[in-house]
Image (cartoon, rainbow, N blue to C red):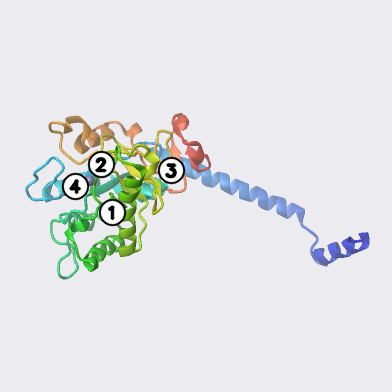
């Protein structure tokens, strides 16, 4: 036990000789800091209001398949159509983020811009083929994204590629690795699309885990990447939706479906990480008159209060005050109502 005298001596030593605590100064510093914080917040609120930020608004997650000169199904786009799709996004102030960034809530785009997620399913060679120089071949999806980005500084060529064992048509291990590493090195995301592209609905837990785990292990062995998002084949969830999210060989932060609406922001109460909707990229024709990309982009343009608009600060969730009931509780500390 420390004696009374011992405690006193210790206190005297700790205080030292020249350190009369200046309480007035300390208090002033505290007031200063609080005032500064308040001023910073006020500036952030002002900026958010100026650009009419709406970080509880919806995000279009576009779904592409093959990019081929002669589209054969309504899933295909020609290189010209694909380029026009991207140029429209540029014109309408959309900036690409990856699916992984979206589900992590890391939406780091300039103030006043809208996020868009560009997803590519089935790992077709029309999305990614490299020439002998290791450069993307003309008219592939990655080449067209780069062309558009080069012509529009600030617009990043960022896509999410949902890979099956087809691996962009490559069968040799070294070539498969080259494809995946190219994507990784060039700012794209590699996602899981199951090994054999089977419909997971109605399958056993083991079959679901095998299908997702097998390609996860292959992607990791080839490119040292653990996908954090999955696109479900045909948009179908397994009998328990959580089976697609977590398994022995995978741990996803988001599972994407195949249709037919823009997605809720990850900060919104209506967001469900295990079932995030996507929109097929297609003109307003036939089945696509209402529920594909051209129609939805028209709708988002006409309804700016429904669309996600960034305040330019990835660490806040800014929104008009009346939207407060839609904020997910877990993001309360990030919130910046105006
Ligand atoms: Zn698919």
- The tag on residue 203 is none
Residue at point 19%, 68% (across, down): 134
What whole-number distance in Å separates the C-alpha atoms at marks 3 and 4?
38 Å
Mark 2: few, some, or many residues within 10 Å (few <14, many ≥20)? Answer: some
- Asked if the residue under mark 2 is in contact with the one under mark 3, i.e. CB atoms within 8 Å, the reply is no
Q: Which residue is mark 4?
A: 65
**Residue 9 position within the rendered picture, expressed as x and y whole percent measured from the top left:** 88, 65
**Residue 188 position within the rendered picture, expressed as x and y whole percent measured from the top left:** 29, 56
Q: Earlier in the sequence, mark 2 or mark 4?
A: 4
Q: Image quadrant for the N terminus?
A: bottom right
Q: Which residue is mark 1?
A: 158
Residue at point 24%, 53% (across, down): 164
Q: Is mark 1 within 8 Å of ligand 1?
A: no
Residue at point 17%, 39% (across, down): 282
Look at the numbered disc 2 and give the secondary structure of its residue.
Answer: loop
181 left or right, relative to 245 = left
Q: Earlier in the sequence, mark 2 or mark 1?
A: 1
Q: Which residue is mark 2?
A: 199
**Residue 28 position within the rendered picture, expressed as x and y whole percent measured from the top left:** 69, 51
Look at the numbered disc 1 and give the secondary structure of its residue.
Answer: loop
Q: Which residue is mark 3?
A: 47
Mark 4: few, some, or many residues within 10 Å (few <14, many ≥20)? Answer: many
């Amino acid at each position: 036990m420390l004696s009374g005298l011992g405690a006193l001596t210790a206190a005297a030593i700790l205080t030292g000789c020249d350190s009369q605590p200046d309480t007035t100064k300390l208090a002033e510093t505290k007031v200063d800091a609080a005032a500064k914080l308040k001023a910073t917040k006020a500036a952030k609120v002002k900026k958010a209001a100026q650009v009419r930020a709406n970080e509880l608004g919806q995000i279009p997650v576009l779904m592409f398949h093959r990019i081929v000169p002669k589209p054969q199904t309504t899933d295909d786009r020609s290189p010209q159509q694909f380029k026009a799709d991207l140029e429209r996004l540029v014109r309408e102030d959309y900036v690409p983020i990856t699916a992984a960034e979206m589900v992590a809530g890391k939406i780091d785009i300039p103030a006043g811009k809208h996020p868009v997620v560009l997803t590519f399913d089935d790992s077709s060679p029309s999305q990614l083929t490299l020439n002998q120089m290791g450069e993307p071949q003309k008219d592939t999806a990655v080449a067209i994204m780069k062309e558009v980005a080069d012509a529009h500084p600030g617009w990043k060529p960022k896509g999410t590629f949902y890979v099956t064992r087809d691996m962009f048509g490559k069968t040799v291990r070294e070539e498969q690795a080259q494809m995946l590493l190219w994507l990784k090195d060039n700012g794209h995301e590699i996602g899981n699309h199951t090994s054999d592209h089977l419909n997971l609905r109605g399958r056993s837990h083991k079959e679901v885990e095998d299908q997702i785990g097998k390609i996860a292990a292959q992607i990791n062995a080839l490119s040292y990447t653990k996908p954090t998002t999955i696109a479900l084949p045909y948009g179908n969830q397994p009998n328990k939706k959580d089976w697609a999210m977590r398994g022995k060989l995978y741990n996803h932060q988001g599972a994407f479906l195949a249709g037919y609406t823009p997605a809720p922001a990850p900060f919104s109460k209506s967001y469900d990480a295990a079932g995030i909707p996507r929109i097929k990229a297609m003109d307003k024709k036939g089945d696509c008159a209402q529920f594909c990309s051209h129609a939805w982009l028209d709708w988002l343009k006409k309804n700016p209060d429904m669309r996600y608009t960034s305040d330019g600060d990835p660490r806040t969730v800014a929104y008009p005050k009346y939207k407060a009931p839609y904020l997910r509780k877990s993001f309360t500390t990030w919130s910046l109502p105006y």
